[in-house]
Image: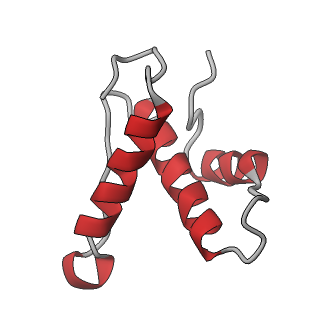
Amino acid sequence: MWDDHTIPTNSDILINFIRLIRSECNPEHHGPLLVHCSAGVGRSGTFIGLDRLLQQFDKSSLHGYLDIYGTIFNMRQCRDKMVQNE
């Protein structure tokens, strides 16, 4: 999808990719989804964070409010440096 220490060139492609993976990998039938890049924090963290936010958006009655900072904060409590910003 994108090189290490860079950003995706097209967010629509990334969002569509995540939605495709989510539609094909039903945890009720296949177990949890495993995502891992070279270090397990940059691209993996971005993928996981965006997946969590998309799920919040799809389930939310507010359809517009997403707690991006709270999501990343919670992820970083589980894994240090999750979602690189440098």
Seen at 37% across and 29% down, the residue is: 39
In-image side of 56 versus 20 (left or right): right
Seen at 25% across and 68% down, the residue is: 25
Horizontal and vertical percent position of residue 47: 44, 43
Q: Tell me if residue 21 can be seen.
A: yes
Q: Tell me if residue 44 can be seen.
A: no
Seen at 79% across and 59% down, the residue is: 65
In-image side of 57 versus 40 (left or right): right
Horizontal and vertical percent position of residue 21: 29, 57
Image quadrant in which the C terminus is located: top right
Q: Residue furthest bottom?
A: 28
In-image side of 13 versus 85 (left or right): left
Horizontal and vertical percent position of residue 43: 42, 32
Seen at 63% across and 66% down, the residue is: 56
In-image side of 14 versus 21 (left or right): right
Compared with 38, 52 (above or below) is: below
